[in-house]
Image (cartoon, rainbow, N blue to C red):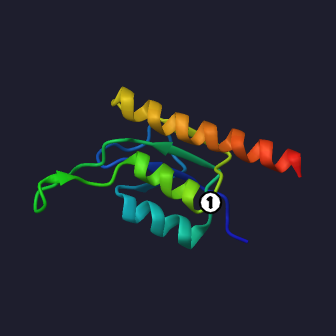
Amino acid sequence: MPLPYKLYLDDLRTPRTEGWVVVRSFEEFVATIEQRGVPTEISFDHDLGWDEARNCELPSGYDCAKWLVAQGLLVERFNVHSANPVGAANIRGLLENYRRWREENLNSN
């Protein structure tokens, strides 16, 4: 059984407290969860940088949240520390709605 851990997603910042596994990109986010299992807590940034070669945004924290939902994974606790208010609201809305949907479906069975 994997050891419990907390995951901090941000392309630039570091957590203010110790005890976080820091990932900087969508790819690192996915690889860490595939290797270590679902964390007990995730702190999300939304904007994860710019791809200079392709001249576009890199996959965002919202893409990471969508990946969790697509995989059927539910994190116990999450926080959104993004400075992007629309992106932060999208992450919160998606994960809160998914949690509610799971609870309703599990209770109805």
**In this rendering, would 37 be left or right of 28?**
right
Tell me if residue 82 comes above or below residue 29 in the rendering: above
Q: Is residue 71 above or below residue 108?
A: below
Helix, strand or loop under label 1: loop
Residue 12: image location, x then y, percent? 29, 46
Residue plotted at (87% across, 46% down): 108
In the image, taking residue 81 as reference, residue 57 lies left or right, namely left
Nearest the eye: 51 or 3: 51
CA neighbours of label 1 inside 10 A, class few (<14), some (14 to 19), many (20+): many
Occupied quadrant, residue 29? bottom left
Reply above or below: 96 against 73: above
Q: Is residue 81 visible?
A: no
> In the image shown, does 83 or 65 lie closer to the viewer?
65
Q: Is residue 80 left or right of residue 52?
A: right
Could you tell me which residue is drawn at 65 percent across and 52 percent down?
Answer: 74
- Please report the residue visible at 13 percent of the width from the left and 60 percent of the height from the top: 54
